[in-house]
Image: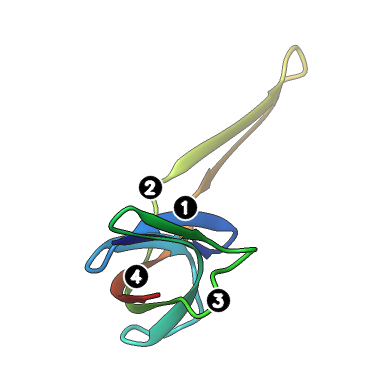
């Protein structure tokens, strides 16, 4: 059984026991979070929501918060000696999927 859930404007294919990294959530480590279920597949039967599946619940636990790898942003204008180097690390929340109910 798997489901497609939505968090932070992105969609993730999950099963029970999976660990996923989503956009940063304002929950403490150990909190339980409910995610929007967009699609559920169980033994070949697929149920798609419009936009979410009614009665389907995906419960996840916040495992950790962190920052992703550094991305270098380098902007320049040729022939003008204008350069700007900047780094960015995107914050994320790590979730462990506890249960999927149809």
N-terminal of the pair, mark 1 or mark 3, is 3
Mark linked to residue 54: 3
Which residue is the site of mark 4?
95
Q: Which of the two residues, 61 or 59, is positioned nearer the viewer here?
A: 59
Q: CA distance from mark 1 to mark 3?
A: 36 Å
Question: Residue 10 in the image: x percent, y percent?
Answer: 54, 55
N-terminal of the pair, mark 2 or mark 1, is 2
- Whether the residues at callouts 4 and 1 have beta carbons within 8 Å, the answer is no
Residue at 47 percent of width and 52 percent of height: 89
- Whether the residues at callouts 2 and 1 have beta carbons within 8 Å, the answer is yes
> Image check: 1 left or right of 10?
left
- Whether the residues at callouts 1 and 3 have beta carbons within 8 Å, the answer is no
**Helix, strand or loop at disc 2?**
loop
Image quadrant of residue 46? bottom left
**Helix, strand or loop at disc 4?**
strand
Question: Residue 79 in the image: x percent, y percent?
Answer: 75, 12
- Whether the residues at callouts 3 and 2 have beta carbons within 8 Å, the answer is no
* The C terminus lies in quadrant: bottom left
Q: CA distance from mark 2 to mark 1?
A: 6 Å
Which one is closest to the eye, mark 2 or mark 4?
Answer: 4
N-terminal of the pair, mark 4 or mark 3, is 3
> Image check: 49 left or right of 89?
right
Mark 1, Cα crowd under 10 Å, few <14 / some 14-19 / many 20+, is: few
N-terminal of the pair, mark 4 or mark 1, is 1
Which residue is the site of mark 2?
69
Which residue is the site of mark 1?
89
Residue at 30 percent of width and 71 percent of height: 97
Mark 4, Cα crowd under 10 Å, few <14 / some 14-19 / many 20+, is: many
């Amino acid at each position: 059984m798997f489901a497609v859930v939505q968090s932070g404007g992105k969609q993730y294919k999950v099963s029970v026991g999976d660990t996923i990294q989503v956009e940063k959530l304002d929950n403490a480590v150990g909190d339980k979070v409910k995610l929007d279920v967009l699609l559920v597949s169980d033994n070949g039967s697929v149920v798609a929501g419009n936009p979410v599946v009614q009665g389907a619940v995906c419960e996840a636990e916040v495992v950790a918060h962190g920052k992703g790898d550094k991305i270098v942003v380098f902007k320049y204008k040729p022939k003008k000696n204008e350069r700007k180097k900047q780094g960015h690390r995107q914050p994320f929340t790590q979730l462990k999927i506890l249960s999927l109910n149809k």
